[in-house]
Amino acid sequence: MLFSPSVRLWLLPNVLLLVALSTWGALRYPHLPGRIPKHIGADGIDAWTDKTIGSAFVLVFVYAGVTVLMAGSAELTLRLTPRDELSNVTATPFATARATSSLLNRPGSRISARRIARALLLLNTCIGTSFLAGCGMLWRCTPNPSVPAWLLPAMTLPLLAGTAVTVTAAVIDRKR
């Protein structure tokens, strides 16, 4: 199997969100105007681009890539041998130095590894939720340069929440 059962379980919301974004985008694409937003600045949309598959689905493609990266990171976190399962090698001074350096970014325990892996996949879900709001702005049917007030909080708050959970998981691991 490519991913362990716990990663597959926690990856499911991300895959569903990716499928929902792709389906929504495929349904909206024929109705999009010839020019779509390319960049949103402080004063609204300040750059436009021609409608192409790449420009219309850029957030979906980025989210797919981030999902692969986060799922791989979560799986590798679970496959690492935690610090508490490594033997304390002190045969030579070099072995001690190597063991100390290899422990630097290793989870403290299996429980901690699962916590960190889940936090990474939850962060990915939050990124997808943020991109969902961005797609709502990108896939409007009329080329309107105004940006609704809800867009910034709708894109920022999920990212902050996911980051807070991930940092908390890492801090808990470091304290133990």
Image: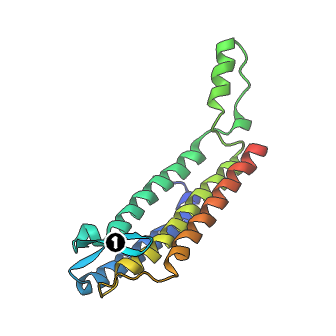
Query: What percent of the width, then of the height, locates residue 176?
Result: 79, 44
Q: How is the image coloured?
A: rainbow
Q: Considering only vertical position in the picture, is 98 above or below 91?
A: below
Rendered residue at 35%/64% (across/down): 61
Query: What percent of the width, then of the height, locates residue 3?
Result: 50, 54
Relative to 89, is 146 on the left or the right? left
Image quadrant assignment for residue 95: top right
User: At numbered mark 1, what does the secondary structure look like: helix, strand or loop?
Assistant: strand
The three-letter amino acid code for the residue at tag 1 is Asp
Outermost right residue: 176
Rendered residue at 59%/59% (across/down): 6
Q: Is residue 101 visible?
A: yes
Rendered residue at 42%/77% (across/down): 20
Q: Is residue 1 visible?
A: no
Query: What percent of the width, then of the height, locates residue 2?
Result: 45, 52
Relative to 161, is 57 on the left or the right? left
Q: Nearer the viewer, residue 95 or 48?
A: 48
Outermost front residue: 43
Q: Nearer the viewer, residue 82 or 132?
A: 132
Q: Considering only vertical position in the picture, is 82 above or below 95?
A: below
Image quadrant assignment for residue 27: bottom left
Q: Considering only vertical position in the picture, is 58 above or below 20?
A: above
Relative to 19, is 52 on the left or the right? left
Residue position marked by numbered label 1 in the rendering? 46
* Mark 1 neighbour class, 10 Å CA radius: few under 14, some 14 to 19, many 20 or more: few
Query: What percent of the width, then of the height, locates residue 106?
Result: 64, 39
Outermost top residue: 92
